[in-house]
Image (cartoon, rainbow, N blue to C red):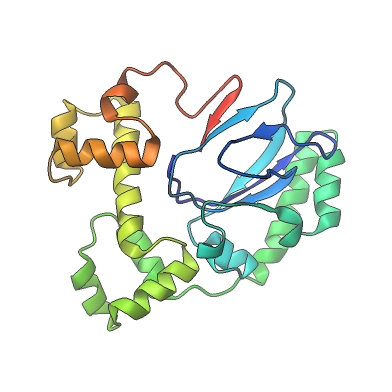
Amino acid sequence: MADRFPRIVIQCLNGSNALHCAHYNCIYAASLKGITSKPALFQMEPAYSHVAVSFFPHGVKALFGVDAFETMDSVLDLQNFFSKNVIEKIIIARHTKTRISLLDSYLLKKLRLMKTIDHRVLNFLQLCPGAHYGRVLKGYGISERHFERMFLQSVGFTPSYYKRVVRFEKAHCRIQQGDYRSLASLAYESGYSDQSHFNREFKEFSGTTPLSFTTKDELLTESGSLLEA
């Protein structure tokens, strides 16, 4: 489903790939997955093991210095952004604790060299989805075009699209937790104009309607051989 959190995934299968998805031409044994604007279904082979790290929405730009929009809806070879030697050590490590320690050590070094993200972008991330875009821009003292360009570089979505994804995620989470009286009331409380609007946007970002999701079997985020992203 639509996902505002980029991540790295390193498969611990002696350099082999055991993930498959019709939406991507190539999936690497060690990959950087950018933010996603649309649903995609990954299938795992029976023998599967990995370590992964999810980042904040601005993590790709801050840690790797790459404009986030260039990685959107993409699965990229992690060796273009990460130490090849560290990746190989993680893949051949025999214990999860060792793999995590190697990841921690490398990422802490990257943090010391982290690129600065404009404070207005960070502020907008904290305010979503309740922020009134026009009022926020006025407070920032910046033009809409300039802010949108900065936001695209840092996060990958436009500010308005990012707000939509956050709103969807919150509604999705409430359905998972059973925290709603009815789908109509959830649509209203989430800020959708009506239930039809809620249904369209939910399906756009998840591939299914809210009603179908509530009656779905326990294949929500991860199960046996399937992983939704």
Eyeballing the image, is 61 above or below 202? Answer: below
* Image coordinates for residue 40, horizontal then vertical, percent: 50, 38
Front residue of 4/86: it is 4
**For residue 50, side relative to residue 148 (left or right):** right
**For residue 191, side relative to residue 207 (left or right):** left
Eyeballing the image, is 40 above or below 176? Answer: below
* Image coordinates for residue 28, horizontal then vertical, percent: 72, 45
Residue at horizontal 35 percent and vertical 49 percent from the top? 165
* Image coordinates for residue 100, horizontal then vertical, percent: 73, 43
Number of numbered markers: 0
Where, by quadrant of the figure, is residue 112 drawn? bottom right
Front residue of 164/57: it is 164
Eyeballing the image, is 1 above or below 162? Answer: above
Residue at horizontal 59 percent and vertical 19 percent from the top? 224
Where, by quadrant of the figure, is residue 51 drawn? top right
Eyeballing the image, is 82 above or below 178? Answer: below
Tell me the quarter of the image containing the N terminus. top left
Residue at horizontal 69 percent and vertical 58 percent from the top? 107
* Image coordinates for residue 111, horizontal then vertical, percent: 64, 65
Residue at horizontal 65 percent and vertical 27 percent from the top? 44
